[in-house]
Image (spheres, helix red, strand yellow):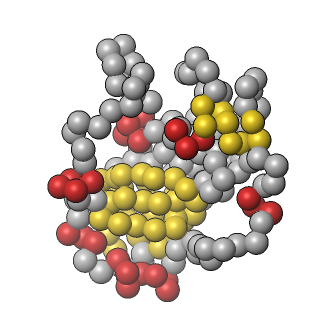
């Protein structure tokens, strides 16, 4: 699913083969129309442009944790990008002139493939664990590891920039 490009570097050990130290559990799954990496939107902006909504289904033991979430207009979803390689530590993105370290990129390939998504909360049914959202940029069946309310007052920084990405002519992806 991921090809290695010139200039990229791999970790010596695959984090997937190491003993677990955080005991992360999946609390549900994401249902999306995206079944192949090639057709999956690259980011949430692209996902919204498709006009395709998505659904999270939270497993029964965790549904009480949704109480009060209906107050939020938007939510932060942390997902586990389970198809992504975990050994790629330096990547050579197609859009970049030179290789970059994984922690300076939003690529799904990383030692701990945690996805971060901010979505509009469309509907919530606590009894069934169903959360309808406006869009998502992950493959169907992607595990959910956490959900948090999005607070524009503390989560948004209007002056945040990335050198070389937030300049005229750049698309910001």
Q: Nearer the viewer, residue 134 or 144?
A: 144
Query: Residue at position x 52%, y 38% from top?
Result: 104
Relative to residue 143, is residue 23 depicted above or below?
below
Please tell me whether residue 164 is drawn above or below residue 24 in the rendered image: above
Foreground: 133 or 42? 42
Q: Which of 112/83 is in front? A: 112
| Viewer can see residue 67 | yes
Is 4 situated left or right of 76 in this image?
A: right
User: Quarter of the image containing the N terminus?
Assistant: top right
Q: Dividing the image into 4 quarters, which one contains the C terminus? A: top left
Tell me: residue 157, above or below residue 70: above
Q: Quadrant of residue 5?
A: top right
Image height of 76 relative to 108, above or below: below
- The reply, left or right, for residue 56 in relation to residue 154 is right
Residue 94 point in image, percent of width and height: 61, 22
From where the camera sits, is residue 36 visible? Answer: no
**Quadrant in the rendering for residue 170:** top left
Residue displayed at 80% across by 63% down? 17
Pinpoint residue 100: horizontal percent, then vertical percent: 60, 31
Is 146 left, or right, of 133 in this rendering? right
| Image quarter of residue 66 | bottom left
Position of residue 103 measured from the top left corner of the image (x, y, whole percent)? 55, 44
- For this orientation, the residue located farthest to the top is 169
Q: Residue at x 58, y 17 (%)?
A: 97
Residue 121 percent location from the top left of the image: 29, 59
């Amino acid at each position: 699913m991921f090809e290695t490009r010139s200039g990229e570097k791999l970790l010596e050990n695959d984090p997937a083969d190491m003993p677990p130290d955080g005991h992360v559990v999946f609390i549900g799954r994401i249902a999306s129309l995206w079944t192949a990496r090639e057709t999956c939107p690259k980011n949430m902006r692209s996902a919204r442009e498709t006009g395709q909504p998505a659904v999270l289904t939270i497993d029964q033991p965790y549904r009480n944790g949704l109480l009060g979430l209906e107050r939020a207009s938007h939510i932060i979803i942390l997902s586990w990008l389970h198809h992504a390689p975990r050994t790629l530590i330096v990547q050579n993105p197609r859009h970049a002139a030179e290789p970059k370290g994984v922690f300076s990129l939003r690529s799904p390939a990383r030692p701990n493939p945690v996805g971060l998504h901010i979505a509009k909360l469309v509907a919530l049914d606590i009894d069934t664990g169903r959360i309808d959202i406006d869009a998502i940029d992950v493959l169907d069946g992607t595990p959910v590891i956490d959900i948090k309310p999005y607070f524009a007052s503390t989560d948004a920084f209007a002056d945040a920039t990335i050198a070389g990405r937030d300049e005229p002519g750049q698309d910001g992806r």
